[in-house]
Structure formats: structure tokens, C-alpha cells
Image (spheres, rainbow, N blue to C red):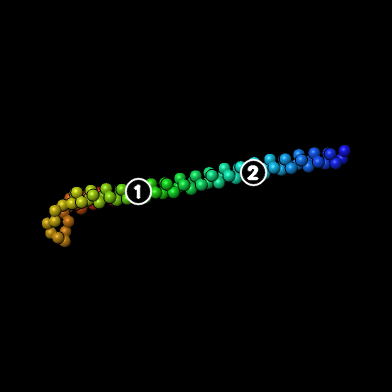
Amino acid sequence: MARLWFVVALCVGAGAFGFHEGGQRCEARHAIAAIEKAERAAQLDAERIEVARQRDNLVRELEELSNADPVVVERCIGPNRVRRLNALR
């Protein structure tokens, strides 16, 4: 009879241990998935910021080219261009 109780207790203990370990592994998998998701979101955000920066630089260059004054003296720029460049700061 003592052996039967020992076997039952052993089975219950093994089941509880398995249940506990399975729960921990499940939580770890979910945590890893959340970390990977956050890393991917950060990477996409960095790419988005870089594309926005490139777009802004291109817009600024195109605007400067479209508003450029004709060259009167090669060493000087016109007063309107100076005002526009100062306004960009």
C-alpha cells in the first residue's frame, strides 16, 4: 500500500513539475516573440526616419534650385537668395 501511495505521489509530482515547466517555456516563447516584434518595429521606424530625412533633403535641394537667382556676378549671390537661405535656418 505504501508503494501505491509513493507511485501516486511520484506521478502527481511529475505532472506538477511538467505543468510548471511547460508554463515557463510558454511564457519564455511569448517574451521572445515580443522582443523580436519590438526589434522589428524599431528597425522599421529607423528606416522610416531615414527615408523621411532623405525626402526632406531632396525637397530642400529642389526648392533651392527652383528659387536660385540668376548669376549676376559669379562670386556673389543675390540678396533674395541670401534671405531665403537665412529663412531655412
Q: Position of residue 83 (x, y in %)?
A: 21, 50
Q: Could you say which disc has been placed on residue 4 in the image?
A: none
Res. 83 in view:
no
Mark 1, Cα crowd under 10 Å, few <14 / some 14-19 / many 20+, is few
Q: Nearer the viewer, residue 87 or 40?
A: 40
Asked which secondary structure carries label 1, the reply is: helix
Q: State the SS at label 2.
A: helix
Residue at position x 83%, y 39% in the image: 5
**Residue 21 vs residue 38, the one in the foreground:** 21
Q: What residue is pinned by disc 1?
A: 51
Q: State the residue position of label 2.
A: 24
Going 31% across and 48% down the picture, which residue do you hit?
55
10 Å crowding of disc 2: few (<14), some (14-19), many (20+): few
Across and down, in percent, residue 2 comes to 87, 40
Residue 79 to residue 14: above or below: below
Disc 1 residue type? Val
